[in-house]
Image (tube, grey):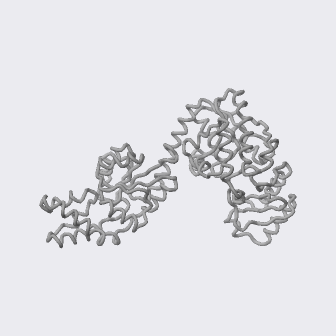
Amino acid sequence: MPHDGLVIGFDLDMTLIDTVPGFSATLAALGAELGVDFPVAEMTARLGPPLDHLLIEHLPESDVAAAGDRFRALYPDHAITSVGVLPGAHEALAAVRRHHGRVLLVTGKFPANARRHVEHLGLDVDRVEGWVWGAGKAAALRQENATVYVGDHVHDVEGALAAGAVSVSVLTGGCTRDELLAAGTHVVLDDLTHFPAWLDAHLLDLRLEVLARDLRARGSLLVAFSGGADSAFLLAAAVRALGADQVAAATAYSDSLPLVERDPARDFAAELGVRVLTPTTHEMDREGYRANAGDRCYFCKAELIEVLTPLASEHGLAHVATGTNADDARAGFRPGIRAAGERGAITPLLDAGITKEQVRAASRAWGLPTWDKPAAACLSSRVAYGVEVTPHRLARVERAEHAVRDLLPGVRDLRVRDLGESASIEIDPAALAGLDAATQGALHAAVLEAGFAEAAVDPRGFRSGSMNERLPDPDRYR
């Protein structure tokens, strides 16, 4: 499944919204006009079928079409403001957005009235397809490549199955669990409050399957292994798919890799039983890297892949793989990804659509110690663009960060940014809020002791990639 192609379909009545009050009021108004005493409670007990199916049991067949038209005309005045969302509806739609997906509303309701509900209730929907029922819903689902359809009625199940989509049913309509299961639904939830967790697990399972198939097809792999959460997960996934003898980890040693990262990375790889290669890279010899313009990462990744490619060949490994995930590609400013791709490196996590959140969830499920490891970008990422990268600067940053971590034990995310001769200390916002004057003074002194002329705590706190905020034209380097 393409990581940017997720489409989830939802039914409207009794799935996202509680239509009963509005439907009842409109039916009562229609009955008053026609002089018909409709059994409102009975007719609203199992909403979902087209209106004509409900009216034909109480009106002459010749009158049904006109009565349906009149019902739809009365509906806006009697049903929009009285109808609310069902529990978990907004959260279910938000869960799709969190996975960068689109929301398709496929309903038997008159399209204009369906849109009125969407607008009044602020439902986050991309497209509304109305007046479709049962297997007829499949055409709209297939057209948008929807892989999941969520409904409350056995005929919603019919539509999902006809489209080849996963059928998810909720018990907020009139159908029972047994009826829905007998119709062939894949999943039954009590209500939509359970949908976000189900979707998280469903997508993770799908993407892990895609990743495993991809890795098996590769045959063998050299993983560019920094020791971070992404490359550690990729390394573990490769071992699961291929076996340890077909996988190796390459941790490139250079001035930009913090010394504190080296032993844990080697230990992690050794626990998996894979070979650990530690080539030396010389990105500092590249003028573009030292110049530290917005495309510095391009020269770093170019050096890394150009060193690892012959190394992989030497050890009989078919591919060089990086731990780039789906969120990295969406970030928009990643010249390093471009450099690696131009040199033939593969990105299995990105290709499977696996996000950072999913890396952590799967790592935790697999018992990997890196599942909650804080982001640990290279030391050069701490140096402001336009300030030359040198071994002296990187060593100074590493000393300063080490001192700050000693003063703030337990703080997950922090950085010391080199702005030239001054340093900006970024601390996790939660820890920053409780920082007293004495501790701020100690941090200031420690960073000066590491070799900076000036230092200040950034009041905005830690922000991953904050140096990009100082870059005047990031599009230039994409």
Numbered label tally:
0
The quarter of the displayed image where residue 472 is located: bottom right
Q: Quadrant for residue 467, please give it.
A: bottom right
Question: Residue 441 at x, y = what percent?
Answer: 82, 69
Q: Nearer the viewer, residue 1 or 89?
A: 1
Of 235 and 343, the residue lying toward us? 343
113 relative position to 407: left or right: left
Look at the image and tell me whether residue 259 can be seen: no
Left or right for 427, reference 82: right
Which residue lies at the image location 51% right of the left edge and 53% below the top edge? 100
Q: Do we see residue 52 in this rendering? A: yes
Name the image quarter holding residue 103: bottom left
Query: Where does residue 245 sit, x and y in percent of width and height?
Result: 65, 29
For residue 44, side relative to residue 316 (left or right): left
Residue 306's place in the image compared with 391, above or below, is above
Of residues 296 and 163, which is closer to you in this image?
296
Q: Position of residue 134 (x, y in %)?
A: 29, 50
Q: Tell me: 209 left or right of 260.
A: left
Residue 331: image x %, image y %?
61, 52
